[in-house]
Image: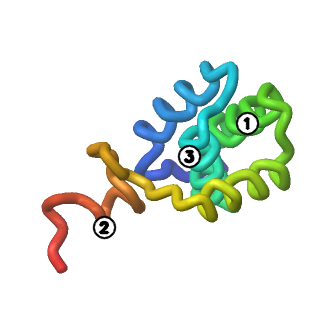
Amino acid sequence: MEGQNHPLYSSDREHVNKLLAQEKPSEKDLIDIARLLIRYEGFPGAEDIKIDMQKALKFWGLSKEDLHHRTREIWKKGFKPGKNSNEIVGSGFDASENSVN
């Protein structure tokens, strides 16, 4: 049985490719890979994305625990997702301009 297709696979694949190209991750890169790891944790599919995220962490010299420690510190310093950008925060579904409340 093959894994499922995640509805955000295409945009996430593109994002992971950009993360893989980072020699030294920014704070935003660390936040992004942490949220993507959470999104795909336990998801029955997208093995290529999961593998590539682990490759990025290894390349950056970070364990999952190191990543979570660093991202907690970033959040404590007042990081705000989407600040001064047009980036969508959340699942993409509930944050779209066309969503109905």
Q: Amino acid at mark 1?
A: Ile
Q: Is residue 31 above or below residue 54?
A: below
Of pointers 3 and 1, the one earlier in the residue sequence: 3
Task: Measuring from the top left, give residue 35's x and y in whole percent.
Answer: 58, 54
Instruction: Tell me: residue 40, above or below residue 33.
Output: below
Would you name the residue on which mark 1 appears? 51
Residue closest to the far front: 77
Tag of residue 32: 3
Residue indicated by mark 2 = 94
The CA span between labels 3 and 2 is 18 Å
Q: Nearer the viewer, mark 2 or mark 1?
A: 2
Circle 2 — which element? Answer: loop
Q: Is residue 24 left or right of residue 95?
A: right
Task: Report the mark closest to the observer, 3 or 2.
Answer: 3
N-term mark: 3 or 2: 3
Q: Amino acid at mark 2?
A: Asp
What's the distance in space between the residues labelled 2 and 1, CA to CA? 27 Å
Tell me the crowding category of disc 2: few under 14, some 14 to 19, or many 20 or more residues within 10 angstroms, Cα based. Answer: few
* Residue at figure coordinates x 37%, y 51% from the top left: 82
Using the numbered discs, state the Cα–Cα distance from disc 3 to disc 1 in whole angstroms. Answer: 16 Å
Residue type pointed to by label 3: Asp
How far across and down, in percent of the image, does residue 6 sit?
49, 51
Q: Residue at x 53, y 61 (%)?
A: 78
Q: Are marks 3 and 2 in contact (CB under 8 Å)?
A: no
Residue found at x 69% / y 32%? 52
Label 1 neighbour load within 10 Å: few <14, some 14-19, many 20+: few
